[in-house]
Every structure is written in C-alpha cells, then in structure tokens.
C-alpha cells in the first residue's frame, strides 16, 4: 500500500481527494493501492514537511497530490515554511548540484546510511554551497543543513514508486527526472495535464434529460459531453462547470451525470470510472485538456479548440501519465 499525502490544497479539495481515493483504491496506471491521505497543512505544508513525513513513514511507495505549475516547471509548495522559494525544478537542481559537488570533493562512494556518515556528507554539502545558492533558496546554512539532511535520509530509503497526482508536472521530462533524483526513487510519474477532483450528482429520466441545462448554475462555463449506449439503449450527458482556479487556469469545479435510465448511469460510470453509479452521487476525478485532441474516428489526432475531460478508464488516460525511471542512489556506511 502506498503512503498518500496531500499538500497545499484548499477549500473542498482535501476532502474531495480523500473521497476519490476511498472509492478508487488502485492508482492508474501503476496500480498502487492507495491509503487514506494525510493532509500536510499548517507548518507541515512545505517540501521540508513532506520529506519529514516521508522519513517518519519509511514507505517504499508514495502518492502525493499537490498543485503544479501550468508549464510543468514545479509545484506550488514552498521549500520550507520560512522561504517564499517554491519546489521548482530549478531549485531542486540547485540542491542536487550542491549534493553532487560535495560527493565529488569528499570522494564519498554514495549516500550515508549511518547518522554519522549522513552528517559528514551534509556538512560537506553545506560547506560547498555558495552564498548565491543559499540566497536563491532563501535558506540560512542551518536551515539548508536541516533540509539536506532530510533529503539524504529520504534518498537512502530506497523508494520504489513515487506518484504525483496534481497538475502538469509531467509536461516536462526534465522536471520528472529531477524530482525522481531528488527523492531517490526508482520510478516517478506525474500527469502532463490539469487534474480535477470533485463529486457528481446523478439524475435520470426523460424530465432531466430535457431540462438539465436549466440547472447549469453558479457562473463559469458549462460543457456537456454526451455518450450513446446500445446495450441497453440510451444516452448519458456528462456536464462540467469550468471556472478559473487559484492558479489562473480554467478547469472543472462542479458537474453532474444526466442519464435516460439508472442502468445507463451505471453504464457511464463503469465505462469512465470503473465503478457503479450511486443514486445519491459519487466522487469523480480525471484529467482536463484545455485544447482537446480527437481520439477516435476519421479526425483522430486533430486538435480542437473544445476542452474536454479524460477519465481514468479511457485508454488514452495512461498516455498522459509520464514517467522517469532510474536506479536507487548508492549507499555506504
């Protein structure tokens, strides 16, 4: 089972993520079994807080849900609670450069296992860091020492799979490689699109099929995506309300399923989410394409200006989870 964390999420999101992972226990495509998520809030809402939680957990598999930058360059997560510097690809590269420099100069054979060996390596790392590097990270030598100690201890714990489930980190192959090396994982994956979590209401019958658009309330722009079914015969409308998120990106924040019958509602949820429908609603998650790619038919591969969801049971969902693979760092006593 994978240790699961959320960080930097506000509003309904921590609860929505928890509801999604309680219902859909196997992460796609790695098939990791999801545990109940721990929300890193307050003083724990930082990269340092995440490292500290991981060090205490000592797991081999991790799932972390956190907001990502639109261009895939990093996460909306401060390095520590005392600095505005975020957990970006460039800042993690700086920390890795400091580490590599110290390993070369000290002629170490790898990461330390004992506390004494780790302290000796981290002492060398801080000593070899430049004032410019510490300023860019917003860290004093003492705080840098604390962060690097946690980084090395997590790196030497031999993490097998690390999965980010937020937005866009997978857009940059360089980013997922740097994050994988930072955590010392063999495999690290992240989506290359926006991610959304929420809950759908369900309504069925001819009345709702004909009048559902009158319930498209709450501002934003509503999009309706219709699926036709043949066994049994019927239709289902998936309606999503899109609003501007805190990161300045348009993504779904509400929605519902309208189906001709209860059986069709269940057909839709099984096709898209791999589970049965519930009359009182159910949690949902997916990816959001701001410029949709036509998936099937004569126009497959063409880009359309119409945005659209990608659901986890759709075959092209897996194509948008990008991975970096490597080896564990060497260790020595």
Image: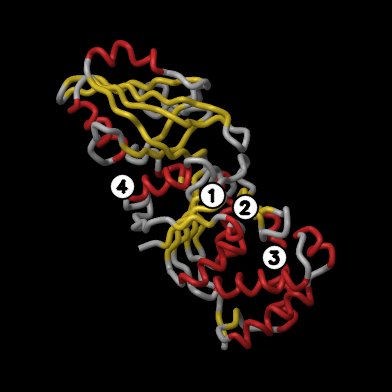
Tag 4: Cα neighbours inside 10 Å, few (<14), some, or many (≥20)? Answer: few
Where is residue 139? Give x, y as percent: 76, 64
Give the structural element (helix, strand or loop) at label 2. strand
What residue would you read off at disc 1?
66
The residue lying at 67 percent from left, 59 percent from top is 81
Q: CA distance from mark 4 to mark 3?
A: 38 Å
Q: Quadrant of residue 230?
A: top left
Q: Nearer the viewer, residue 141 or 201?
A: 201
N-terminal of the two: label 3 or label 2?
2
In the rendered view, would you say 297 is above or below 191? above
Q: Quadrant of residue 295?
A: top left
Q: Which mark is residue 23?
A: 4
Q: Secondary structure at mark 1?
A: loop
Query: Are discs 4 and 1 less than 8 Å apart at CB?
Result: no
Residue 228 percent across, percent down from the top left: 26, 21
Disc on the earlier residue, 4 or 1: 4
Q: Which residue is mark 2?
A: 77
Choose the circle earlier in sequence order: 4 or 3. 4
Marks 3 and 2 sit apart, C-alpha to C-alpha, by 16 Å
Q: Which residue is mark 3?
A: 95
Instruction: Using residue 291 as the reference point, say whether residue 108 is left or right of it.
Output: right
Towards the viewer: 325 or 258 = 258
């Amino acid at each position: 089972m994978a240790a699961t964390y959320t960080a930097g999420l506000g509003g309904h999101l921590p609860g929505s993520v928890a509801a999604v992972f309680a219902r859909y226990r196997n992460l796609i495509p790695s098939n990791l079994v999801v545990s109940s998520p721990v929300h890193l809030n307050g003083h724990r809402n930082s990269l340092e807080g995440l490292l500290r939680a991981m060090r205490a957990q000592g797991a081999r598999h991790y799932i972390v849900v956190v907001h990502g930058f639109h261009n895939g360059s990093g996460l909306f997560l401060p390095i520590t609670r005392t600095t505005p510097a975020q957990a970006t690809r460039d800042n993690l590269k700086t920390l890795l450069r400091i580490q590599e420099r110290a390993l070369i100069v000290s002629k170490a054979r790898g990461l330390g296992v004992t506390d004494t060996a780790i302290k000796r390596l981290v002492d060398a790392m801080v000593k070899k860091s430049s004032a410019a590097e510490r300023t860019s990270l917003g860290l004093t030598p003492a705080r840098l020492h604390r962060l690097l100690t946690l980084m090395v201890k997590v790196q030497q714990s031999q993490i097998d799979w690390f999965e980010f489930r937020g937005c866009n980190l997978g857009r940059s192959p360089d980013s997922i490689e740097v994050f994988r090396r930072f955590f010392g994982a063999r495999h690290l994956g992240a989506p290359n699109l926006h991610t959304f979590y929420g809950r759908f209401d369900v309504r069925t019958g001819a009345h709702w099929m004909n009048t559902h658009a009158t319930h498209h309330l709450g501002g934003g722009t509503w999009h309706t995506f219709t699926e036709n079914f043949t066994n049994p015969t019927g239709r289902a409308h998936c309606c999503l309300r899109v609003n501007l998120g805190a990161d300045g990106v348009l993504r779904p924040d509400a929605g519902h399923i309208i189906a001709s019958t209860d059986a069709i509602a269940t057909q839709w949820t099984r096709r898209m989410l791999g589970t049965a429908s519930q009359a009182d609603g159910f949690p949902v998650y997916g990816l959001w394409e701001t410029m949709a790619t036509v998936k099937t038919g004569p126009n497959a591969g063409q880009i359309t200006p119409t945005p659209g969801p990608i659901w986890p049971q759709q075959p092209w969902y897996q194509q948008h989870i990008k991975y970096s693979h490597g080896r564990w760092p060497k260790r020595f006593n």
